[in-house]
């Protein structure tokens, strides 16, 4: 008897139900339609703290050696953080995904800023690394290249074993940065 009721319930879970005269669609379907409508996913928007992490610098490079004009995206991060916090505080059960609409402009500004910041940091790293690499002797140069390729392999391994999609994207980006740095050092100087 209990198995029959469970089977019957399992068939109705994904269906649209009528409650108090209104059609109620399942929560997951509401989320999917909101994500399609707004062009970003719920997890993307709420993983902004993972996106804020800075690119990994070479071990021997000090932060002071980066160009001073790089924006660290603090103000856009704080505005997005404030928007999401306020959206959580004033969430209306009838419109649970309204924060996706309200915070989307802040999110777009934040994503653009982080992308630009990462490009400028990588450019500064490549410039510094080129001069550092040329100052090394031959065995140290090959050891340095091997270290970069080992880090790249580690990031790819960690990304393949991570369940969190946003952390996987960050690890893949780190691996891509290592590959760019590796190829930059192998190019002859112009």
Image (spheres, rainbow, N blue to C red):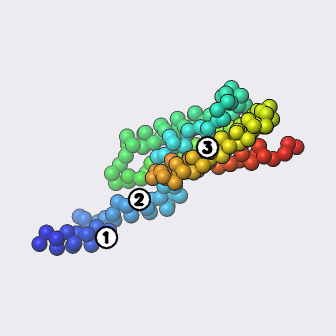
* Disc 2 packing (10 Å; few <14; some 14–19; many ≥20): some
Q: Residue at x 78, y 46 (%)?
A: 186
Q: Earlier in the sequence, mark 2 or mark 1?
A: 1
Q: Quadrant of the N terminus?
A: bottom left
Q: Nearer the viewer, residue 124 or 153?
A: 153
Farthest residue toward the front?
Answer: 139
- Residue at 55%, 39% in the rendered image: 52
Please say if 26 is above or below 74. below
Q: Which residue is mark 1?
A: 15
Would you name the residue on which mark 3 appears? 151
Q: Is residue 23 left or right of residue 130?
A: left
Position of residue 153 in the picture relative to residue 34 (left or right) = right
**Crowd band around label 1 with a 10 angstrom C-alpha radius: few (<14), some (14–19), many (20+):** few
Percent x, y of residue 187 = 81, 47
Q: Secondary structure at mark 1?
A: loop
What separation in Å lies between label 3 and label 2 (alpha carbons)? 37 Å
State the image quarter where residue 13 is shown. Answer: bottom left
The image position of residue 98, as x and y in percent, is 43, 51
- Circle 2 sits on which residue? 31
């Amino acid at each position: 008897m209990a198995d029959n009721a469970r089977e019957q319930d399992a068939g109705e879970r994904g269906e649209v139900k009528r409650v108090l005269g209104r059609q109620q669609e399942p929560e997951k379907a509401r989320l999917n339609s909101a994500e399609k409508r707004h062009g970003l996913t719920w997890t993307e928007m709420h993983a902004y703290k993972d996106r804020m992490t800075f690119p990994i610098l070479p071990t021997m490079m000090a932060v002071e050696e980066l160009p001073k004009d790089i924006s660290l995206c603090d103000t856009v991060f704080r505005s997005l953080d404030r928007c999401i916090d306020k959206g959580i505080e004033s969430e209306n059960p009838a419109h649970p995904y309204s924060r996706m609409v309200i915070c989307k402009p802040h999110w777009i500004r934040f994503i653009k800023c982080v992308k630009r910041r990462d490009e400028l940091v990588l450019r500064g790293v490549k410039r510094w690394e080129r001069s550092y690499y040329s100052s090394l002797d031959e065995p140290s140069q090959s050891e340095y290249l091997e270290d970069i390729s080992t880090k790249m392999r580690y990031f790819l391994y960690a990304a393949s074993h991570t369940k969190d999609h946003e952390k996987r994207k960050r690890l893949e980006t780190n691996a891509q940065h290592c590959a760019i740095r590796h190829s930059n050092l192998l190019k002859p100087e112009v």
